[in-house]
Image (cartoon, grey):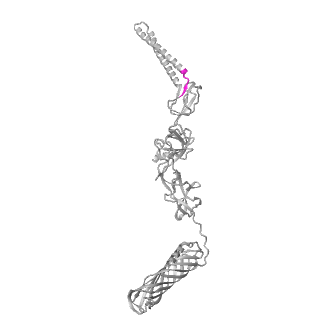
Amino acid sequence: MRKLVVGLALASTALTTPAFARDGQWYVGVEGGAMIVEDIEFDVGALNNATIVDSDTGYDVGAVVGYDFGPFRLEAEVSYREADLTDVQTQVGISRGAAPTAIGRFASVGSANALAFMVNGLIDFGPDDGLQGFVGGGVGVARTDFNGSTQPGTGPYIDDSDTGFAWQVLAGIRAPISDSWDVGLKYRFFNSDSVDLLSVNGREFDGRFRSHSILGSIIYNFGGEEAAPPPPPPPAATVAVPLQREVVDWDEYIGRFTADEDVQLVARVSGPISRVAFRDGGDVGKGQLLFVIDQRPFRAALAEAEASVASARAALANARAQATRGRELVGFDAISREEADTLAANLRSAQASLAAAQARRQQAQLDLSFTEVRAPISGRTSNRMVDVGDFVTAGQTELTRIVRINPIRFSFDGAEAFYLKYIRQDAGGERRSSRYAPNPVEIQLADEPSFRWRGRMAFLNNGISPDTGTITAYAMVDNPNGFLVPGMFGRARLLGSGTYKALLVPDEAIITDQTRKLVFVLGKDNKVAPRPVQTGPMVEGLRVIREGIAPTERIVIDGLTRMQPGMVVTPRKGQIKARARDDAPIAQPISTPAPAQATAS
């Protein structure tokens, strides 16, 4: 019997094939299973529980016919239950056949049974086309029969029956196995409170019959229209809460690298080139010899100037001596005052002539030094513009060009709107202005996947161009290996805000509705609804959401092509993870700014 009950329980939970609706149908069914009877306690006269009869596990069978009103069912039931007696304990004398009446505990044979006619009311919960539960109860009448003997072959001590009111409590589950057939598993508590019997020796035994049954059932449903096919299951959608990070904004600009110093070398004296002392495109140090212009004419001119200086010194010495004698002779009236003044004037003229000769010598020395063209700065040269033998003209002929590329400038123009944002942030203490603060800049070259070069702001122009509406700025970037060269284009991002908390979502979770950005948010009853959001830059491979969603709200991150406003979905739990981080820079400035990544909150 136990195996039968377990089998029926498994069948009732496993066989859940969809069936036609049961609502508005008649049905019939049969049921059966194991039963346990509570100890039957008889009151004899004024003595309570004078005789107690115990029984073995019995059986319970029945049949029902009913009508399904939808959530409520009403049914008529006939059932029969029986259990064998095992022993009897009595405090009053009971008949033992030929033996005298006795008091005590004795083995007992016989049975107790009840035939009941009940009307049941049941409340259903759960879908008609699947596993359905029910609870309820019933009332009716029951005929309870009791036949007990203390030993086989002896007469009974009770052999009587009584009919009276009975009630029961029911609970169970049922499930369809075809269009018309259901199987079920039911628990029944049956109670007949007033059972009045007479023993064979004429004593009145007043007791009750209570039992607990586990029943398997099979039910046939009559008629009923075919149920509509079940709706398709809600589409699956992967949902996740946004990733929370503390981030800073980085504003992006297009610019190019320019030399920190750019010098064009032009000949300062005229003459033919006699030597080229550098390699085209090579790095040179400050003061390094680059060109030599034919020095012979300039050496001759210097020699002539030095001779002129010597002649002027001799003339000055003679004029000084004559002026001294003139001052002595004028005291003896040996010469006139006019002659003495003339000698003094000649001395001053000789002094001036010496100064002029010395100036011409200095100019000749300079011209001779200008024949050796040296690098005024350390940097990298261009190609030479002249070759050995070419005649160069002072102040006109360009010889080569030198640029200083370590550090190197990255120049760019910013829109007026960005400038206004920055000065307002500076006024509010959120971000210092680049006019006096070396804000970090990160640069990406045309063939690089990330922003690998770091620099610091060094210049912000003093006005906005009326022609373009932009303001010019540049940053200084360390370039120790000379990899970066003037004219190279790049994309820069400049620190654009202070630190703030932001929510990050995948870019593919955002859809565009004309001018709005939207995400689908999972709400109550697994319904999705579009939500306008304000987006920001990319951080860690995810898009910053500035406004529109809360940190605890779940958004759809996969399956967006099937989403419609108000649609019910089957949510699948997902997780948003960071996707990318910038590589370490090749060249580090003296003080490396923090990477353009969000830091974990």
Q: Is residue 476 above or below residue 14?
A: above
Q: Is residue 125 visible?
A: no
Residue 221, percent across and down? 58, 78
The magenta segment:
290-298
Residue 542, percent across and down? 53, 53
Residue 109, percent across and down? 45, 87
Give the mark count: 0
Q: Is residue 411 above or below residue 249?
A: above
Residue 377, percent across and down? 50, 32
Among all residues in the image, which is located at the extreme top? Answer: 334
Q: Is residue 429 magenta?
A: no
Among all residues in the image, which is located at the extreme front? Answer: 153
Q: Is residue 570 visible?
A: yes
